[in-house]
Image (cartoon, rainbow, N blue to C red):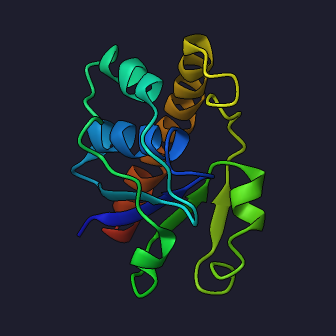
Amino acid sequence: MKSRVLFICTGNSARSQMAEGLLRHMASELFDVYSADTQPRDLRPLAIDVMASQGIDISHQESTPLQAYHNDTFDYVITLCHRAHENCPNLRGQFDTINWAVDDPAADNRYRDFQAALKHLKTRLAYLVIIEEKRRKSANGNKL
């Protein structure tokens, strides 16, 4: 069974969309991946462009309101900015959340900022994949 991951950031227009597409690309066999926010906005063209430079198409992804997942359960809920972490009090108690502070590339809307966010996400997601692989091995009785 795949672990379910929900990425949340302000707007659901760049960081969370990039994380969703990247983790799906890296480990779709391990994870079902979603993203959302309380105030969804249109997907940023530079997010689409920087992901396309990596061979990952996120152009079909859409911003989703957090309420859409109100009755769902997740193994990992990851906020990608402090504001999303602070503004999602309804998640505290329903889910344990992990907060990754990734600078908002949409703030100045420069390609290099989107590249930096992508690099940051790649590093963090690589660790998440390792953790999940080890968790699965442990659950199956294999030594770590």
Residue 103 sits in quarter = top right
Question: How many numbered marks does the figure carry?
Answer: 0
The residue positioned 67% from the left and 86% from the top of the image is: 93
In this rendering, does residue 27 appear at all?
A: yes
Horizontal arrangement in the rendering, residue 81 relative to residue 73 (left or right): right
Q: Provide residue 47's location: percent of width, then percent of height.
A: 45, 28
> Is residue 18 depicted above or below 36 in this figure?
above
In this rendering, does residue 143 appear at all?
A: no
Residue 42 sits in quarter = top left
Most foreground residue, 129 or 107? 107
Horizontal arrangement in the rendering, residue 92 relative to residue 137 (left or right): right
The residue positioned 55% from the left and 30% from the top of the image is: 123
Q: Provide residue 32's location: percent of width, then percent of height.
A: 29, 60
Most foreground residue, 17 or 29? 17
> Is residue 13 depicted above or below 34 in this figure?
above
Most foreground residue, 120 or 139? 120
Q: Provide residue 136's location: percent of width, then percent of height.
A: 35, 61
Q: Provide residue 99's location: percent of width, then percent of height.
A: 69, 55
- Image quadrant for the N terminus? bottom left
Residue 4 sits in quarter = bottom left
The residue positioned 46% from the left and 83% from the top of the image is: 70
Name the outermost residue toward the front. 42
Horizontal arrangement in the rendering, residue 116 relative to residue 21 (left or right): right
The residue positioned 46% from the left and 33% from the top of the image is: 44
> Is residue 41 depicted above or below 124 in this figure?
below
